Image (tube, rainbow, N blue to C red):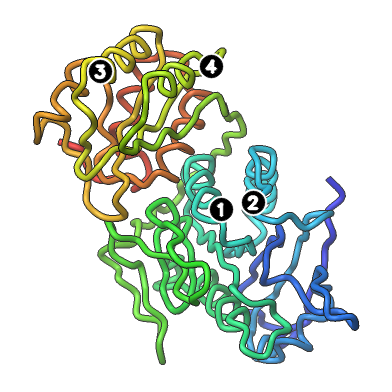
Amino acid sequence: MNYKIVRLNTGAKNDIAASVLIIYTGGTLGMAYDASGALVPFNFGQILEKIPNLTNMNVAITVISFPEPIDSSNVNMQHWVDMGYIIYENYDTYDGFVILHGTDTMAYSASMLSYMLRGLSKPVVFTGAQLPISAMRSDARENLMTALEIATAKANGNPVVPEVCIFFNHMLLRGNRSKKVQSVHFDAFESENYPALAEAGIIIDYNYAAIKTYEEGKKLKYYNKLDNRVMILKLFPGITSKILDSCFDIEDMRGVVLETYGSGNSPSESWFINSLEKAVKKGIIILNVSQCNGGRVIQGRYQTSKDLKKIGVLSGGDITTEAAVTKMMFLLANETDDTEIRRKLVTPMIGEMSLTG
């Protein structure tokens, strides 16, 4: 791809304390109003005019922009491959990475990159904004400034946050534990099943117990194979056998993330169980996740979920839907044995879930 590269002249020219690579994929943060009042992609060569405080940072900043900024609603597997490749190719050059991304699918992208970048020992901080950077009340400036500080933060010479995360509205969250929950408020993301990694106030208060442990000498491995022959199936009262069967009959379907009620409950009618059992016997892997933002799937806790466990539906525990579907896409492409895929789906790989028990 023909990436656009801008190097910003910030801070002192000598004795630069750290270096960070900003990857601009698109999204509201990187938009500005033109003379007619329409939103257009922002020229990052002029970012110091919008955020003059950047000049106070003793940090070398490089911006790589996608050739055409994408609305995050249009994010696909190739964009994930591109983001991962940019980080992998520049991994030894920078102390940390900030990815500017639209909020709608940010949790999906952060989850996927956590799987693709194995052995990561540097910060990869996703951030964005609810209002464009040129708007008077924009949250873009604070989100970007703090994300940059987190991406370059070190303790005893080591990165403080050596993992993929999301910073938004004062809160730093593990990327594969995050979910977008607001479209009109600044606190757009939450992580109900895992504590925040940090909270930014007068200082950035890091929750070291929740942050992934830094592993010295760890070599980064980049996986670029993904398989999107998956789907998310959300249960609702009134769902019919025709709907289920038509989903499971999709040609070459390999995996289904099944969003059930509460702690993993579903209809107990025979037609429902029979439809799922037929799909499992056909080789489709079904992962049970909860529709609730918090809590976890406990298959067998109630009678309505005992049959799911019996026919081979997997329990997703406290994983989010976003982390579940991206994990399935990753494993289906990088594992050849279905038994191993099923084992890894219910086992924590990179902090995306707790032990299912």
Residue 298 in the image: above or below residue 180 = above
Q: Which residue is mark 3?
A: 273
Q: Which residue is mark 2?
A: 73
Q: Residues within 10 Å of mark 2 (few under 14, many from 20)?
A: few
Distance between the alpha carbons at the discs numbered 4 and 1:
25 Å
Q: Which of the two residues, 134 or 38, is positioned nearer the viewer here?
A: 38
Residue 17 in the image: above or below residue 177 = below
Which label is found at residue 105?
Answer: 1
Which quadrant does the C terminus fall into? top left
Distance between the alpha carbons at the discs numbered 3 and 4:
18 Å
Residue at 48% in and 69% down: 167
**Residue at far right of view:** 35
Identify the mark nearer the N-term, 3 or 4.
4
Q: Position of residue 63 (x, y in %)?
A: 75, 66
Determine contact: label 2, label 1, CB under 8 Å.
yes
Q: Which of the two residues, 252 or 81, is positioned nearer the viewer here?
A: 252
Q: Amino acid at mark 1?
A: Thr
Q: Position of residue 56 (x, y in %)?
A: 65, 91
Residue at 61% in and 88% down: 137
Q: Secondary structure at mark 3?
A: helix
Identify the mark nearer the N-term, 2 or 3.
2
Distance between the alpha carbons at the discs numbered 2 and 4:
24 Å
Q: Amino acid at mark 2?
A: Ser
Determine contact: label 2, label 3, CB under 8 Å.
no
